[in-house]
C-alpha cells in the first residue's frame, strides 16, 4: 500500500473557502489581504477578506465556519435536559447567561414560568450577573490588547479568575457549568458562597475604577477609539444589533427591563448608554464605556441578590433546588421563542416540539454576535487598516455562537 500523503495544490484554498473578490476585478492600487483566522485580533477563528487601498479599507468580507458548533443539529438529536452542556459552548465566556435563556424557553413550554421558588430565581440572577462581569472583563481587557494597552488586561483577567473560581466552586466546572437546570439548579450555593462574593465586590469595584482612570481617560486610548467605528442608531437597529453594541449607539434597550424576566423587575439598576462623551455617540469609545458601566450595574444587582439570599430567601434545610426538575420532559406540541439579555446582546431560542418526543423537532438560535459581525463591513469601509482592529474589538464577538 502506498502511504497516503498530502499533495499541495494551489487551488485547494480557493475551492474550500472562495474569496468574493479576485485579482481580475480589483483596481490597480487595491490589494487583497487575508486577515486571520490565526491572528488574535480577529478572535482566533474569524477570517476577514480585506480589500485595501494603501492604508484605507475599501471593503471587508467576513468568512465563517472556522468554529462550527453544529449546535442546532446536536440539539435536534438530544433530550431537552442533555442540551444544556451544548448551550454552554455557544458563548463560552458567559455560559451561565446562555443556560438561563435556554432553560427559560423550556420552562415556558412546561408551564413552569414564574412558578419556581424565589431562591432559585435569585441564585440564577446572581450567577448570571457574576458571569456578565467576567465576560465584560474579557471584552474590555482584550480590547486594550487589541490597541496596545497591556496592563488593564492583566488586572481584569486577575479579577475574572476570582469569579471563575467562585463559579467553579459552585458547579465543579471552570467555564462550561451545566448548573442552571430546567425547573431548578444543579445544587444549592455552597456554604459560605455569599460571604466570599461579598468580599470580592470591593476588589472588583477598585479594579474597575483603576481601569477607568488608566484607559478611558488616556489620551492615546481616546485617539484610537473616539470618533472611530461610528454606528448610527438607525443602522444598529436595521442590522439587528443588541446589547452594548446597540446601547452604545444611544438606545436604552435591555431585555432585563423590556421583557422583565426572572426577578429583574424587583431589582434596581440603570441601563448605561453611549452619550458621545469623548467623540460621537456610537463610536468605539462609547461601546467600551457601556461595558465598563454595565459591570458597575451588575455589581449592584449582585449586592441586591446577596441581600435576598441571606434574608428573605435564605437557605433552609428543606430547600431542594431539584424539587421541580422534571424527570421526563415531553412538552405539548408548540412553538416557543424566548430571549434573554446576554453580556453580548440578545440570545434567543426558538424551539418546536411535536408533543410526542422528549427531543425537540427543531431548534434555532438567535445569536447576537452573528448580527454584530454582519455590521462590520458597514463600519469598516473608508477607515484606516489600524482602526479596523479597534472596530472588531469594540464589537466583542464570540465565534462559538456565530456558526451554530
Image (spheres, helix red, strand yellow):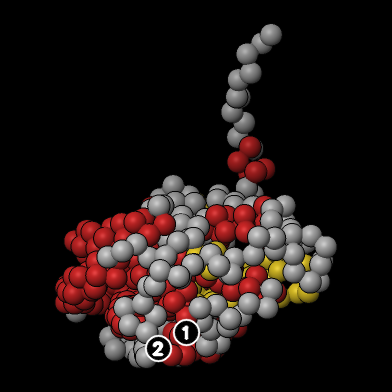
Q: What element carries label 1?
A: loop
Q: Which residue is drawn at 61% across and 24% down?
A: 7
For label 2, the crowd category at 10 Å Cα-Cα, with few meaning under 14, some 14 to 19 and many 20 or more, is: some
Q: Quadrant of residue 105?
A: bottom right
Q: Quadrant of residue 62?
A: bottom right
Q: Residue at x 59, y 74 (%)?
A: 104
Q: Residue at x 62, y 54 (%)?
A: 82
Q: Nearer the viewer, residue 378 or 110?
A: 110
Outermost residue on the top side: it is: 1
Position of residue 358 in the picture relative to residue 143 (left or right): right
Q: Does residue 49 appear anywhere in the picture?
A: no
Position of residue 87 in the picture relative to residue 294 (left or right): right
Give percent across and percent down for residue 171. 41, 57
Give percent across and percent down for residue 114. 58, 83
Give percent across and percent down for residue 255. 52, 84
Residue identifier under label 2: 267
Q: Which residue is drawn at 59% across and 65% down?
A: 325
Tell me the tag on residue 263: 1
Q: Do the residues labelled 1 and 2 touch (CB within 8 Å)?
A: yes
> How far apart, in angstroms, are the residues tagged by discs 1 and 2?
7 Å
For label 1, the crowd category at 10 Å Cα-Cα, with few meaning under 14, some 14 to 19 and many 20 or more, is: some
Position of residue 153 in the picture relative to residue 283 (left or right): left
Q: Does residue 314 appear anywhere in the picture?
A: yes
Tell me the tag on residue 209: none
Q: Is mark 2 on a helix, strand or loop?
A: loop
Q: Nearer the viewer, residue 79 or 393?
A: 79
Rendered view: 178 above or below 324: above
Q: Quadrant of residue 269?
A: bottom left
Rendered view: 70 above or below 299: above
Amino acid at each position: 500500500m502506498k502511504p497516503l500523503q498530502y499533495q499541495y495544490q494551489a487551488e485547494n484554498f480557493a475551492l474550500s473557502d472562495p474569496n468574493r473578490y479576485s485579482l481580475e476585478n480589483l483596481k490597480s492600487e487595491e490589494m487583497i489581504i487575508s486577515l486571520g483566522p490565526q491572528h488574535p485580533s480577529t478572535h482566533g477563528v474569524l477570517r476577514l477578506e480585506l480589500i485595501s487601498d494603501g492604508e484605507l479599507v475599501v471593503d471587508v468580507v467576513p468568512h465563517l465556519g472556522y468554529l462550527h458548533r453544529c449546535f442546532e443539529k446536536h440539539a435536534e438529536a438530544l433530550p431537552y435536559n442533555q442540551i444544556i452542556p451544548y448551550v454552554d459552548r455557544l458563548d463560552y465566556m458567559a455560559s451561565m447567561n446562555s443556560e438561563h435563556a435556554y432553560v427559560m424557553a423550556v420552562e415556558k413550554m412546561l408551564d413552569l414560568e414564574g412558578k419556581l421558588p424565589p431562591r432559585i430565581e435569585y441564585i440564577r440572577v446572581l450567577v448570571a450577573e457574576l458571569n456578565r462581569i467576567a465576560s465584560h472583563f474579557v471584552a474590555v481587557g482584550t480590547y486594550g490588547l487589541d490597541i496596545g494597552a497591556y496592563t488593564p488586561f492583566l488586572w481584569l483577567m486577575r479579577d475574572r479568575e476570582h469569579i471563575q473560581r467562585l463559579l467553579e466552586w459552585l458547579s465543579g466546572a471552570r467555564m462550561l457549568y451545566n448548573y442552571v437546570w430546567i425547573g431548578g439548579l444543579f445544587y444549592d450555593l455552597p456554604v459560605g458562597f455569599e460571604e466570599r462574593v461579598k468580599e470580592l465586590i470591593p476588589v472588583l469595584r477598585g479594579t474597575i475604577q483603576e481601569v477607568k482612570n488608566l484607559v478611558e481617560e488616556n489620551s492615546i486610548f481616546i485617539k484610537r477609539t473616539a470618533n472611530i467605528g461610528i454606528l448610527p442608531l438607525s443602522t444598529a437597529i436595521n442590522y439587528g444589533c443588541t446589547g452594548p453594541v446597540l446601547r452604545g449607539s444611544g438606545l436604552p434597550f435591555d431585555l432585563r427591563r423590556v421583557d422583565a424576566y426572572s426577578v429583574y423587575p424587583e431589582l434596581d439598576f440603570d441601563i448605561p448608554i453611549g452619550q458621545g462623551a469623548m467623540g460621537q455617540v456610537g463610536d468605539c469609545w462609547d461601546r467600551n464605556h457601556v461595558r465598563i458601566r454595565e459591570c458597575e450595574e451588575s455589581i449592584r444587582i449582585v449586592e441586591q441578590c446577596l441581600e435576598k439570599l441571606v434574608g428573605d430567601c435564605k437557605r433552609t434545610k428543606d430547600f431542594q433546588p431539584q424539587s421541580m426538575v422534571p424527570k421526563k420532559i415531553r412538552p405539548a406540541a408548540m412553538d416557543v421563542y424566548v430571549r434573554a439579555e446576554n453580556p453580548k446582546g440578545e440570545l434567543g431560542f426558538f424551539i418546536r416540539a411535536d408533543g410526542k418526543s422528549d427531543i425537540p423537532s427543531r431548534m434555532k438560535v438567535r445569536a447576537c454576535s452573528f448580527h454584530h459581525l454582519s455590521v462590520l463591513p458597514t463600519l469598516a469601509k473608508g477607515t484606516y487598516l489600524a482602526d479596523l482592529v479597534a472596530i472588531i474589538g469594540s464589537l466583542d464577538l464570540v465565534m462559538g455562537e456565530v456558526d451554530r
